[in-house]
Image (cartoon, helix red, strand yellow):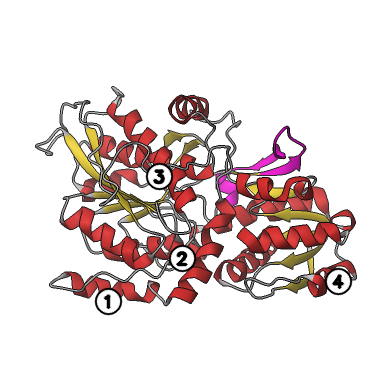
Amino acid sequence: MDGTDGTTGAEESGTQSVRRRGALRYLGGGALAAALGTAGCVQQADGGGSTPTDMTTGGGDTETGSDSGDDTATGTGIEGSGAESVTMGVLVPESGPSAPLGGAQRQGAELGVQYVNGSDEFDFTIDPVFEDTQTDPSTGLQRAQSVVEDDGADYVVGALESSVALAVADYVSDRDVVYTSGAATIELTGESCNENTFRTETNAAQQMAGLVDFVASDLGSNLWIHTTDDTYGNSAVAQIERRIDAQGVDIEVVGQTMPDKGTSNYGPQISNISNSEADVLALPDTGADLINFMKQASSAGLTEEVDIIGTAIFAQVSRQALGSDAVGAYSSTLYNHALETGDNRAFVDAYRDEYDGVPGSFARVGYDMVRMTARGIQEAGTNDPAEVRNALEGLEVTTALGTTSFRACDHQAVNPVWTGQVVEGEEIPGIELLNQVSGDDAIRPCEETGCRL
């Protein structure tokens, strides 16, 4: 997701100015960035239970956002490093609209650092430097420059907002720095890809694959698409249509409604859907737009007329806000703490011990982006970013989602996706997982991504 709270951009000086000018295309005005942002990430809002309220959890200087990490663990050093630790910049929004999501991603990253530093699997330790992107692309870019140029980080992870991730990716594109992203925007491993950028997060195209496949196999053939008329909404529509064509499934898109962001009255759209031939409503929407539409659709009886499948309904924040209005709906699902995949059980146990809750999607991404990067360093036997970049391509590793890898052609993690149905729960509705699309089946073919590495 991307967004802005109006923070001013970094000052341009010296050699930094060239790359900053290159990144400015991602740093649009406040209204545009905010519109892009809510669309790009909330669909992956924390799918677990814990929403952190103390954004300084795990230590750190709350004025600078910097944290030197746990210095108690020691390593033996890695070949050619001349040091026992590797500096890693961790960029997360700890203030601004995305703070709760960034707090979850930071908690996962902290556990990832603990995993590496406490494991005999690695011949080095990670010295993390945590920085607050403030839910703002210009600030996020400035923080990336700080960890690389001031703190000496050769590795940067995080940035869950799409606009921040694109700016950071552009910044590292001609530097000896490996960036592992926690954002979902398709462009990051598509048209805007570069050899130094990898992505642990499941991208929007993979998520739409799960949605389309489940509609075709379990729900119906007459599909209506409702979403907000913004970057994420338009991208979601394009990816749904692409998947339908690619799979050759018996689905006809019988209509679309794409109101403006922040629409308060969805009566006209609900009436159009109700009077159509649709038997399934795809709802790739997020945040307040999703919540308000679903509440009005339920009140109008639309949820009794058509099956609804979304992309953000699985998220804990959505289920909590919707309550009984979400029960019965389906959702493409990126992660659930109950998964019996990879080393997820150990992750959930560690998260419970540390934070007294269960992890959601953002925490999972934070955990695995640190560990996947670390495994590339270990595989390379050196902390030389160029060697690590080569080692990461195609390296199969165990994650909370199972065994996965970064594809060599675009550096996208080959993650599976699930479909779940919202069911009654004790405090808030729960998610019952129904099926899975494998990572290989969900991901776009290399030739369709627009990435040229």
Q: What kind of residue is marked 2? A: Gly
Residue position marked by numbered label 1 in the rendering: 21
Callout 2 touching callout 1 (CB < 8 Å): no
Mark in the foreground, 4 or 1 = 4
Sequence-earlier tag: 4 or 1: 1
Residue position marked by numbered label 2 in the rendering: 3
Sequence-earlier tag: 3 or 1: 1
- CA–CA distance between discs 3 and 1? 31 Å
Residue in the image at 60% along x and 53% along y = 207
Mark in the foreground, 4 or 3 = 3
- CA–CA distance between discs 2 and 1? 19 Å
Sequence-earlier tag: 2 or 1: 2
- Is label 1 in a helix, a strand or a loop? helix
Q: Position of residue 89 (x, y in %)?
A: 27, 48
Sequence-earlier tag: 4 or 3: 3
Q: Position of residue 180 (x, y in %)?
A: 36, 50
Residue position marked by numbered label 3 in the rendering: 55
Is residue 369 in the magenta section? no
Mark in the foreground, 2 or 3 = 3
Residue position marked by numbered label 4 in the rendering: 271
Q: Which residues are magenta?
A: 419-442
- Residue toward you, 53 or 200: 53
Q: Is residue 320 left or right of residue 180?
A: right
Q: Quadrant of residue 134?
A: bottom left
Callout 2 touching callout 4 (CB < 8 Å): no
Q: Quadrant of the C terminus?
A: bottom left
- Is label 4 in a helix, a strand or a loop? helix
